[in-house]
Image (tube, coloured by chain):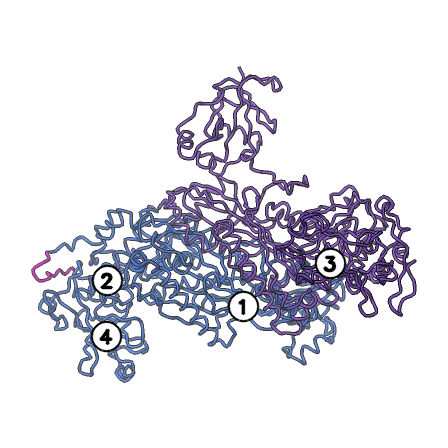
Chain colours: A blue, B purple
Amino acid sequence: MSDPLVIFTPSGKRGHFPVGTPVLTAARQLGVDLDSVCGGRGICSKCQVSPSYGEFSKHGVTVADDALSEWNEVEARYDRVRGLKEGRRLGCQATIQSDIVIDVPAESQVHRQVVRKAASDRVIVMDPATKLYYVTVPEPDMHEPLGDFERLRAALRTQWEIEEVTAPLSILSKLQKALRKGEWAVTVAVHRGHDDSAARIMEIWPGFHEDRIFGLAIDLGSTTIAAHLTDLRNGTVAASAGVMNPQIRFGEDLMSRVSYAMMNPGGDLEMTRAVREAIDGLTVELAQEAGISPAQILEAVFVCNPVMHHLLLGIDPVELGQAPFALATSRSVSVDATELGLHGMNDRARVFVLPCIAGHVGADAAAVALSEQPGKSDDLVLVVDVGTNAEILLGDRSRVLACSSPTGPAFEGAQISSGQRAAPGAIEKIEIDPTSKEPRFRVIGCDLWSDDPGFDAATAASGITGICGSGIIEAVAELRIAGLMDARGLLGSAEQTGTPRMVAEGRTHSYLIHDGTADGGPRITVTQGDIRAIQLAKSALYAGARLLMDERGVDKVDRVVLAGAFGAHISPKHAMVLGMIPDAPLDKVTSAGNAAGTGARIALCSVAARAEIEQTVREITKVETAIEPRFQEHFVNANAIPHATDPFPELLSHTPLPDVSFNAGSSGGSDAAGGRRRRRRA
Amino acid sequence: MSDPLVIFTPSGKRGHFPVGTPVLTAARQLGVDLDSVCGGRGICSKCQVSPSYGEFSKHGVTVADDALSEWNEVEARYDRVRGLKEGRRLGCQATIQSDIVIDVPAESQVHRQVVRKAASDRVIVMDPATKLYYVTVPEPDMHEPLGDFERLRAALRTQWEIEEVTAPLSILSKLQKALRKGEWAVTVAVHRGHDDSAARIMEIWPGFHEDRIFGLAIDLGSTTIAAHLTDLRNGTVAASAGVMNPQIRFGEDLMSRVSYAMMNPGGDLEMTRAVREAIDGLTVELAQEAGISPAQILEAVFVCNPVMHHLLLGIDPVELGQAPFALATSRSVSVDATELGLHGMNDRARVFVLPCIAGHVGADAAAVALSEQPGKSDDLVLVVDVGTNAEILLGDRSRVLACSSPTGPAFEGAQISSGQRAAPGAIEKIEIDPTSKEPRFRVIGCDLWSDDPGFDAATAASGITGICGSGIIEAVAELRIAGLMDARGLLGSAEQTGTPRMVAEGRTHSYLIHDGTADGGPRITVTQGDIRAIQLAKSALYAGARLLMDERGVDKVDRVVLAGAFGAHISPKHAMVLGMIPDAPLDKVTSAGNAAGTGARIALCSVAARAEIEQTVREITKVETAIEPRFQEHFVNANAIPHATDPFPELLSHTPLPDVSFNAGSSGGSDAAGGRRRRRRA
């Protein structure tokens, strides 16, 4: 009679093992994904399995009730103390007696796969730089007087195949007490970066340590800092929070911060201190929210644009303000949190900053590349991360290009007359009836449209306070669709358009969306100045994308991904009417949410991803918008808002763009024939 | 006609090279030791050579006057600005025209050999962990936007074959300014430890940097801290200084400091702070004395016993106070000076602490092993480093054994009634006339004997203040030789010995060496208590050595090396009369001076030595005196001071040890037949 057959599900891996073989041993020999932190000592319970009994015609086996050994003392104790789920066994304790089918539940799989978000099937294989290991260490021997640390090292090598581990002095000073308190067993958190040759011990606890360990994924933007406190065992987000970047007081946009550093000796250090303090505060807040100790946070991953990157690292960004825009360092940066002056987390926490692509294309763009993987796309994809700067990636398996375009803050509702940040009360969606020219809209925090019954009551609390970035884009596009604005971006007068919503303001006109003055609220309008600001922003964005397309030698892309916290809320239809993005079938324009933040989380959860992006970034073709004459050309040509002859039949069939033309006061004259058609020449 | 023949002296290396080959290039191709910091750019002048002209029958060549190219502009400028020694050429500029003999002067050799001290022919090949490199870096290119640091890295790889260099953030933040100020050339100090996989940039200067860089070799003793500020280019000592270890206030000896840490929570940290502050002070003092900036000190190497080792590193030494005497770490330790809380040197300075051999045998013993190299000795050598603890090494090429023995502070003049530290005014040498029983002596700071004319005048300034460690050893041995003390160590009375210098003190007697009371000075005597203290110390030392000899299976050694600041001053003859050290021919007992400090300097000047000692230490057989029953046995048996039948005929022929025996008051009875003869049994 041959050895019993063991079949693991869901992997389907199978093999014969001698009677008495522990399930964990069989799993390891077959390469089945079965977790174990304590190394099979019945302590960690990570190797739980669910045996199945009865007949399995599919597998051709019948499993007897006694196919596994009886519960032993270790399992009984574990069940008594902590409780073992119905039907579960500890894989390190239960041994094989006869043919058996064993299921490995998802939470017992080492490489737990974490779905990035419901809308996507992108998964991250958990393989963080910092992991916990339970290890038993031989007692000291006077006749072979190796240090406690050297015996721990040797134990990590034999028990966990971790070679050449190092430890900072602050661990060495805790080591001896921990070993003795744990009776020659400790749990250590070991960090192995993607390029560090030496693993290092980050933390040590006596005996088996139950507590979770965490990392921070931080998207350090010019305007906001967003952080996700992430469980390093399974990648789940325990808490998220954001805070304004306090550097705003030194300058709204990046170039004004660079100027501040140039004009004020020590100004770069002021900004560095400010952002580090904000990160410390955010860290403490997140730890409190999740109910954990800051000492449990052992890692942080940062993504940011090059100026923020330098300011975070304490490097004067002055070189980034002038050609040739030389980065101090373009590779990823791995340092101690304390070297960054960060003190909100574990004293020994490590920081990983993604690599920058170029002087204007930062680690945030690298994070988008890591998240959206244009280099693994079969079709040609354009990824646009919309913010104060737009990061633009274009590519497929053959090649990826990247650039950055200075769109300015208009897309985020700044420098817009009725603009505001995305918050309850802000208009985020708008439609203008092409016939009546009347608007209907929705505000953040309410699902009703403004002409739905109950809208006033539902928005009474927040009021209608302004218009946010996605709202202004829709408003401008709708004005064009409704024939209230010509292809050059000029708004018509009440006379020209036949609607009293067009209000004269000096020599130009505004469109009145909502007048709340009767109730003490604001008058919300779109002014000619607002339209100019949006035109500049969208021209910059479009020009950047076109530049990459030129470089690639194409005049269309297969699909477009809109990324960025704001990008997620842009209506693809309106973005295309505006001419923000190049032509693509509407169903091929998708939103990726905060792709940079997702990239940070991916790098936090996977050292392989860190190695990948380090490599990927070097292979990306960098295009520098600031010195490329064709960028200016594209920018000027992109200023117009295309009219009805543009190729959006499927999109715009119900609302052909009218070929109107307005004169703004005495200036003007029609050059509506320009616009998108002219851009085609490039 | 074949290419010109080039012969380098003193190496004798020779080869043929095409006309026009620079001398430096020829030297490199032949593997001739010719320095260059600037990489052949005519900046550093390190590659100076002395061409020889005329007939060289020995080499079979005749060198024409125009065998090298004419002075070029670079050499002319160099000579104008800095001056070039008569007959010297710059090896990177002068090119070969015909057969030539070229001498490489010592200062142009890369691996300058530094003679350790005049009395020894041991040399150190200079190969320090930290060296300077001049490097030119390509300017940034917008189309290939590698960071400034990445281009510097690449340049170090191609120009200096330094792979994978890293830099802390504090260097990255200085990098961009330095590169631009140096017009794309910088000098960097790069550190490569013996086990670090990655080289790291320690300092950066624009252009070619002239200043020297330094390291500290620090012998951190229980009682004193001695440091040598060492030039890292050539190993010369620029300044030396010592300071008392401020931990003395927590306990004179190591075990009382360990007790202090055990009894007082946080006491270990108090002691750590104290010693670090003292090191900082010493560092600043040395920099001032040498007239350099503390920022020029880029490295420090420490040697110390295990308790000092732990206290320096901030590790509670409590485990070292009890069996099994477990070290927190036994390997060498490489850390940033700032991690040690040291701030007297460059912010990025690195610290290397030699490995410990065992819980009682420290990095100081490892340093002695590195300096004295017992493992490379053809004959069996016993190395004794005498201090508050004695480090003892015994070995030859086949095997080395080590132990530590708690001799206590008596050898250093502490716990001796008239004892004092070695300082001007202390009696350091003494002779007692066997007939008259009268003493004559010398004091530190004066070359005259006390019975020489002019002695009183010469010592008037210092006075005669006490007796130091080497003095008390000689005094006790001389008392035995003069028949004033019996083999058990009992001093006779005035009656028994016939000299009024024997003074009764209670039931025991003292020997009066010098009575300065008439001039307000002290009475300097050797008391029975002093003799007991010395007996205990010498028994411990001897027992440790015997234990190693037992382990090795020998009852004599070929030679003895006395090391330690104090060991250098011990008279071999008196040490052997006392029975401090095992029998050896007197001419085979030598002094090695401060061997531990020398070991520190060797490790500072050579990474190969670091690797060597790391390996050597693991191969040494450790013997733990504290738990070895035979140690007690040897200790008890070693208490006596041998008499005339002992085998020192060549040494003692002029003064046979008298076979006297005294009774101390009512106690006593003669057991003088014990002593050395009994020890022989072991």
x, y percentage for residue A231?
Answer: 52, 69
In the rendered image, residue B572, in percent from the top left (x then y), is placed at: 77, 48
Residue drawn at x 38%, y 47% is B145
Mark in front: 4 vs 1: 1
Q: Chain of mark 3?
A: B
- Measure the alpha-carbon separation of dots 2 and 4: 21 Å
Front position among marks 1 and 3: 3
In terms of sequence position, does the residue under pointer 4 or pointer 1 come before the other? 1
Check residue A660 for magenta coloring: yes
**Crowdedness of circle 1 by 10 Å Cα count: few (<14), some, many (20+)?**
many
Distance from the alpha carbon under mark 4 to that under mark 3: 113 Å
Residue at image point 21% right, 62% down: A656
Labels 4 & 3 near each other (Cβ < 8 A): no
Q: Is residue B661 left or right of residue A433?
A: right
Magenta region: A659-668
Amino acid at dot 1: Asn
Callout 3 secondary element: strand
Give the residue drawn at x 61%, y 57%: B225
Residue marked by disc 3 = B514
Q: Which mark is residue A534?
A: 2
How far is disc 1 from disc 3 in space, using C-alphas? 81 Å
